[in-house]
Amino acid sequence: MDEGYFTIPTRVYLTDVQRAKLDGLLRLAEQNLDALLTGLLEEYLAAQPDPPVEPEPDLSDARAAELAGRRRELRRLRVKLNDPYNPPPPWLVTMVADLEAEIARLARE
């Protein structure tokens, strides 16, 4: 792996027909899937504006730091919660609800 690059484990959901077509096109182009997806993502990202920078919370305030950490955790868990191909287990739904309630409580304080 080149320095400065990293991998993102992911799944690609295709029908049998789409997969066969992709395999054939990759063979014809003498290209592998990693290179194709990397190229597509590079082009997509280059065409998008930079996202707005989230303001950094004042980490000297312990409550603000805890709230920021909880919000980061919630964003990470929501990705798993909203995966249409892998329904979340009941414990994850409960965990996200508890975390949302805790964030609301911390925000009120």
Image: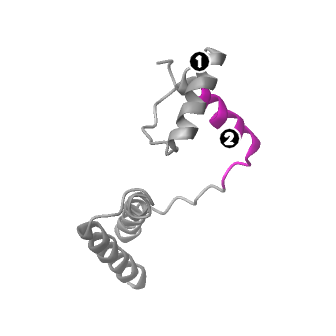
SS for dot 1: helix
Quadrant of the rendering where the C terminus is positioned: bottom left
In the image, is 22 to the left or to the right of 45? Answer: left
- Residue hosting label 2: 45
Residue at left offset 47%, top offset 63%: 58
* Discs 1, 2 touching: Cβ within 8 Å: no
Nearer the camera: disc 1 or disc 2: 1
Nearest to the observer: residue 9 or residue 57: 9
Q: Name the quadrant containing residue 99.
A: bottom left
Highlighted range, magenta: 36-51
* Colour setting: one colour
Q: Name the quadrant containing residue 100.
A: bottom left
Q: Residues within 10 Å of mark 1 (few under 14, many from 20)?
A: few
- Residue hosting label 1: 27
Nearest to the observer: residue 75 or residue 66: 75
User: Quick one: label 1 or label 2, which is nearer the N terminus?
Assistant: 1
Residue at left offset 27%, top offset 74%: 94
Residue type at mark 2?
A: Leu
Give residue 87's position: percent from left, percent from top: 35, 63
Magenta stretch: includes residue 60: no
Nearest to the observer: residue 52 or residue 8: 8
Q: Judge whether 85 appears above or below 24 on screen.
A: below
SS for dot 2: helix
Residue type at mark 1?
A: Arg
Give residue 102's position: percent from left, percent from top: 32, 77
Q: Main secondary structure of the magenta part?
A: helix
Give residue 41's position: percent from left, percent from top: 63, 37
